[in-house]
Image (cartoon, rainbow, N blue to C red):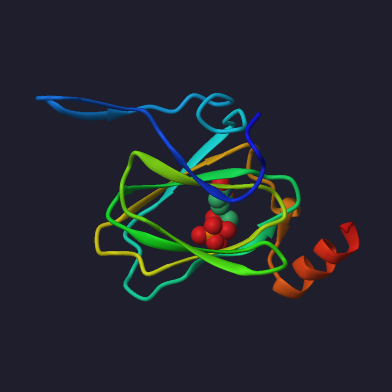
Amino acid sequence: MMRKIPRILNLPKITDQRGNLTFIEGNRHIPFAVKRVYYLYDVPAGAMRGGHAHKKLEQFVIAASGSFTVVIDDGRRRRKFFLNRPHYGLYIPRMVWRELEDFSSGSICVVLASEEYDESDYYRSYKAFLKAFRNQK
Ligand code: TYD
């Protein structure tokens, strides 16, 4: 059983003279089945993405190209994860506030998600997230 805490998960990497190949199977390399994939690209220098938490959604974030930093706030403390290689990623469970920043020029952030897009699953205010987090304890 994979624990549902924010953490880096390493992915398989097949290397030969033609280059590298990495693959991800839902419920095997990451702890959920994938229902949606989206990606961020052409992010201008200095832009901040994310800035929300999810009631139910789980995500896995990969720097498919370039690099960026994911700030994770689990309601108790803040941690920063620097992503810069396509053969690992950051697992983000439900009820975790995240901010993505310091995107390098040309970077691509691929996100695998456990649910389809649903605006009602978002906490877009940090205050509302903290309140909900404290109420569930
Ligand atoms: P937003 O949540 O601001 O992106 P980020 O995760 O970087 O903070 O999403 C930007 C817009 O895109 C917003 O209007 C919602 C929409 N959107 C979809 O329609 N489908 C999706 O899967 C996602 C992630 C966003």
Position of residue 8 in the picture relative to residue 44 (left or right): right
Which residue occupies 54% across, 24% down? 28
| Quarter of the rendering occupied by the C terminus | bottom right
Position of residue 89 in the picture relative to residue 86 (left or right): right
Up-down relation of residue 35 to residue 72 (above or below) = above
Percent position (x, y) of residue 48? 46, 71
Up-down relation of residue 73 to residue 15 (above or below) = below
Looking at the rendering, which quadrant does residue 3 occupy?
top right
Up-down relation of residue 110 to residue 78 (above or below) = above
Looking at the rendering, which quadrant does residue 76 occupy?
bottom right
Find the residue positioned furthest to the left.
17
Percent position (x, y) of residue 126? 70, 72
| Quarter of the rendering occupied by the N terminus | top right
Position of residue 13 in the picture relative to residue 119 (left or right): left
86 or 10: nearer the viewer: 10
Percent position (x, y) of residue 7? 54, 49
Quadrant assignment for ligand 1: bottom right
Looking at the rendering, which quadrant does residue 31 occupy?
top right
Up-down relation of residue 36 to residue 75 (above or below) = above
Percent position (x, y) of residue 129? 76, 66
How many marks are shown on the rendered structure?
0
Which residue occupies 85% across, 66% down? 134
